[in-house]
Image (cartoon, grey):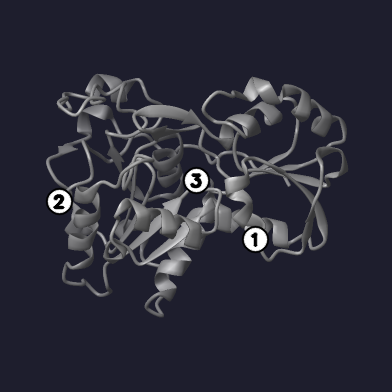
Amino acid sequence: MTASPVPAGPAQGPAAIPTLAGFREIAPRHDLILCDVWGVLHDGTVGHRAAGEALIRFRGLAPEGRPRRVMLVSNAPRPWPSVQAILDGYGVPREAYDAILTSGDLTRDLVARHPGARVHHLGPERDAPIFEGLDLTLVPPAEAQVVVCTGLFDDTRETADDYRDTLAAFRARAVPMICANPDLVVERDKKLIPCAGLIAAAYAETGGEVVYAGKPYRPIYEAALAAAGALDGLPAPDLSRVLAVGDALRTDIAGASAFGIASLLVARGIHAEELGVLAEHDRLGDAAAWLARQSVHPDALIERLAW
């Protein structure tokens, strides 16, 4: 049950990476957009209207052999209907996308392979829908055959260090962990909030087994392409016509690079402070020096997703 991060693909030189004035500059080249959610369509408190409008415009482009489709691909540790309800609440129009795939969906598939398992949920109660309808028993840590980590119990004040003793106890019994959200941090109201990926990384450092469900790991890309093709009864689209849009180098950009698809990095996300666009009045400048320091590079950069 061990998984390793996908390696980054060949990096494009930073000098060759354009900064787009609008998504319209590259949209016609693609049939399928794999779009991140948190950091692109909303910031954890409010939806980004321009991003939703850009995706609607993309879906309305004339098809080139197949319809233009948008799959929202999220590392949210919840089934997709829960994510859709959140997007509805933030005012993200359903016309902006065709379907949603989450790391929570992949986690459910992983757990379902072990019917009757005794599972410990390491994470907040709000993530409990991830277990609904599955053949399992939720148990205390000492009785667990597997632990599913969806996040920190209180991500406003805790860190991975607060879980050191809990992880040591799991490691002593060689309990495998499924990480339902590989993100290390996400942006919420212009603050970076720790995620399940931090706990999983701490467990892996002790020698514990970890399976990651979500980006940047290959299975979520394979599932997203297959689902996109199924929307129209077609095979998965050609990789050269697929674009990943996201705000995180470690997950969105590295995962796309390793899978062999192009990527667009949204600056106003978790890298906003590094790129100097934390405040509303900030404007994205020359990012070449920052990109040169990174181990993986997008194919293009945009301040925020907008047409």
Q: Amino acid at mark 2?
A: Trp
CA separation, marks 2 and 3? Answer: 25 Å
Closer to the camera in the image, 46 or 55 = 46
Taking the spot 58% from the left edge, 31% from the top edge, the residue there is 154
The nearer-to-camera label among 2 and 3 is: 2
Callout 2 environment at 10 Å: few (<14), some (14 to 19), or many (20+)?
Answer: some
- Position of 63 with respect to 9 (left or right) is left
CA separation, marks 1 and 2? Answer: 36 Å
Q: Amino acid at mark 1?
A: Asp
The x and y percentages for residue 186 are 44, 34
Q: Secondary structure at mark 3?
A: loop
Closer to the camera in the image, 274 or 282 = 282
Taking the spot 27% from the left edge, 34% from the top edge, the residue there is 268
The nearer-to-camera label among 1 and 3 is: 1
| Mark 1 / mark 2, whichever is N-terminal | 1
Q: Secondary structure at mark 1?
A: helix
Q: Secondary structure at mark 2?
A: loop
Q: How many marks?
A: 3
Taking the spot 44% from the left edge, 63% from the top edge, the residue there is 225
The x and y percentages for residue 21 are 12, 41
Q: Quadrant of residue 168?
A: top right
Identify the residue position indicated by label 1 in the image: 109
Q: Which mark, residue 215?
A: 3
Q: Are marks 1 and 2 in contact (CB under 8 Å)?
A: no
Q: Quadrant of residue 286?
A: top left
- Position of 302 with respect to 38 (left or right) is left
Q: Are marks 2 and 3 in contact (CB under 8 Å)?
A: no
| Mark 2 / mark 3, whichever is N-terminal | 3
Identify the residue position indicated by label 2 in the image: 307
Q: Amino acid at mark 3?
A: Lys
Q: Which mark, residue 272?
A: none
